[in-house]
Image (cartoon, rainbow, N blue to C red):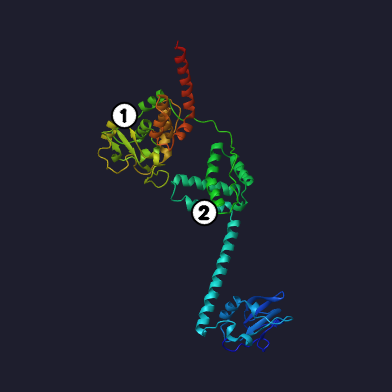
């Protein structure tokens, strides 16, 4: 070893005896059992009492010497049975390689920084793991919504997720994510079901399930707690009439005041004739009308629930062309011929859903009909199509449903009624066979 190494016992020996080292920087080689153990660097002011050997005040850079000794096999250099020791004088420069002082400093600093980086990373991992284990489920769900749903779903859908989040905070404010088991999750669903109908509870379950399955993938939760969940709920309220029959609709339309200027009467007419959604009707512009082919293109909606403006349709299936009867095409062609091609034909200032529903309520009262909402006109349109024998697939496409299943679920009562009529027809047919 280059340079003079002033050893603790000043005799050129690293011996192993009980020592009290203090005040200066030392590299210590601590005895472990009967052999030589780990290497440590004691900072200034550190007091250590134990069985060790020590090097101090060496001209060799302490960081460099520490990492070299850390990776040196001392078992080949140890002498003595009672007190194991190392004589540097026996090995000189052959014990370790010592480069020049500048390189020593660079090498020592590199490994010291590397050690610090590894230690920092380990601490971050430990803190991250602890934070994951301690995070409340309401906070995890909130972060999950921001990460995966904001900007990816329509605002109305996003609002439903935040409504679910509010209920989680109300029902289980102190539930940790790592504590969610099948039992605790079922308790959460049961508590929610105390206040909601079964279908609403099912929607609540589906929204939570997406976040919980991601927590399982991240290792925060060990197993899927949503498996075999039981969906309960309050008894459904008595449903209001959602649609009119053909005679009632005809009565309603006959009482519309269809003048030469755009009005709410025209909104009711086009929804009743096409079955499009209220937001889709508000998003119509003159360029959406194809008078030659007698269709309107549904490719956008109007955000009447917030600050207005065009927005995307509910889903991809909602982008569609809807056939119109020739009379309605003729009426609208004259009505909007002087309207700007990209301007919504029904929008004139702020629009509210309550405005059209209140107008429709007065119209129903005037026509001596049961009150339905503007969305009820869409149900009325679909019901009339089904009763007239139009296939479920065609009705689903006209309404812009994402799948036929949606149409079947929404109009199950009508489908069951039609099925009973079909059975009667089949029986009459069979009875006529000889």
Rate crowding at label 2 as few (under 14), some (14 to 19) or many (20 or more) other CA atoms within 10 Å: few
Q: Could you tell me which secondary element the residue under label 2 belongs to? A: helix
The percent coordinates of residue 289 (x first, y second) are: 29, 37
Residue closest to the eye, 341 or 50: 50
Residue closest to the eye, 249 or 30: 30
Residue closest to the eye, 199 or 220: 220
Q: In this view, does 285 lie to the left or right of 181?
A: left
Residue at the spot 57% in from the left edge and 39% down from the top edge: 196
- Tell me, yes or no, if residue 65 can be seen here: yes
| Up/down of 225 relative to 275, above or below | below
The percent coordinates of residue 255 (x first, y second) are: 36, 27
Q: Using the rendered view, name the quadrant where residue 385 is placed.
A: top left
Q: Could you tell me which secondary element the residue under label 1 belongs to? A: loop
Q: Using the rendered view, name the quadrant where residue 29 is placed.
A: bottom right
Quarter occupied by the C terminus:
top left
Q: In this view, does 414 lie to the left or right of 122?
A: left
Q: How far apart are marks 2 and 1 (CA)?
A: 49 Å
Residue at the spot 32% in from the left edge and 36% down from the top edge: 296
Residue tagged by mark 1?
325
The percent coordinates of residue 134 (x first, y second) are: 60, 57
Q: Is residue 172 left or right of residue 308?
A: right
Mark 2 / mark 1, whichever is N-terminal: 2
| Up/down of 109 relative to 122, above or below | below
Residue tagged by mark 2?
143
The percent coordinates of residue 233 (x first, y second) are: 58, 37
Residue closest to the eye, 230 or 431: 431
Quarter occupied by the N terminus:
bottom right
Q: Residue furthest top?
A: 434
Rate crowding at label 1 as few (under 14), some (14 to 19) or many (20 or more) other CA atoms within 10 Å: few
């Amino acid at each position: 070893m280059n340079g003079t190494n002033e050893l603790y016992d000043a005799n050129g020996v690293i011996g192993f005896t009980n020592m009290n080292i203090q005040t200066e920087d030392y590299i210590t080689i601590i005895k472990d059992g009967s052999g030589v153990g780990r290497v440590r660097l004691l900072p200034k002011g550190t007091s250590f009492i134990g069985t060790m050997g020590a090097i101090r005040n060496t001209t060799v850079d302490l960081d460099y010497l520490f990492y070299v000794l850390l990776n040196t096999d001392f078992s080949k250099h140890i002498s003595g049975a009672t007190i194991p020791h190392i004589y540097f004088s026996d090995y000189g420069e052959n014990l370790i390689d010592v480069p020049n002082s500048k390189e020593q400093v660079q090498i020592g600093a590199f490994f010291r920084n590397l050690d610090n980086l590894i230690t920092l990373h380990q601490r971050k991992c430990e803190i991250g793991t602890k934070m994951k284990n301690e995070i409340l489920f309401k906070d995890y769900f909130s972060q999950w919504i921001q990460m995966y749903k904001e900007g990816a779903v329509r605002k109305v859908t996003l609002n439903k997720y935040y409504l679910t989040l509010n209920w989680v905070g109300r029902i289980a404010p102190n539930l940790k994510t790592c504590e969610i088991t099948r039992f605790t999750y079922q308790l959460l669903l049961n508590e929610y079901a105390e206040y909601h109908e079964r279908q609403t509870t099912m929607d609540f379950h589906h929204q939570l399930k997406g976040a919980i399955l991601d927590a399982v993938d991240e290792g925060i939760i060990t197993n899927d707690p949503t498996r075999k969940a039981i969906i309960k709920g309050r008894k459904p309220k008595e449903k209001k009439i959602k649609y009119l029959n053909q005679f009632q609709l005809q009565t309603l339309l006959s009482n519309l005041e269809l003048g030469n200027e755009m009005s709410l009467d025209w909104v009711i007419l086009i929804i009743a004739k096409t079955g499009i959604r209220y937001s889709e009707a508000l998003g119509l512009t003159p360029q959406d009308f194809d008078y030659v082919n007698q269709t309107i293109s549904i490719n956008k909606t109007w955000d009447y629930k917030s600050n207005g403006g065009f927005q995307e349709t509910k889903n991809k299936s909602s982008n569609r062309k809807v056939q119109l009867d020739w009379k309605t095409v003729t009426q609208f062609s004259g009505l909007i011929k002087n309207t700007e091609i990209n301007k919504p034909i029904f929008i004139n200032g702020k629009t509210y859903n309550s405005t059209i529903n209140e107008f429709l309520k007065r119209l129903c009262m005037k026509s001596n009909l049961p009150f339905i909402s503007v969305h009820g006109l869409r149900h009325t349109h679909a019901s009339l199509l089904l009763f007239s024998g139009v296939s479920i697939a065609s009705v689903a496409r006209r309404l812009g449903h994402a799948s036929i299943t949606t149409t079947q679920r929404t109009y199950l009562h009508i489908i069951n009624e039609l099925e009973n009529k079909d059975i009667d027809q089949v029986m009459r047919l069979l009875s006529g066979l000889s």
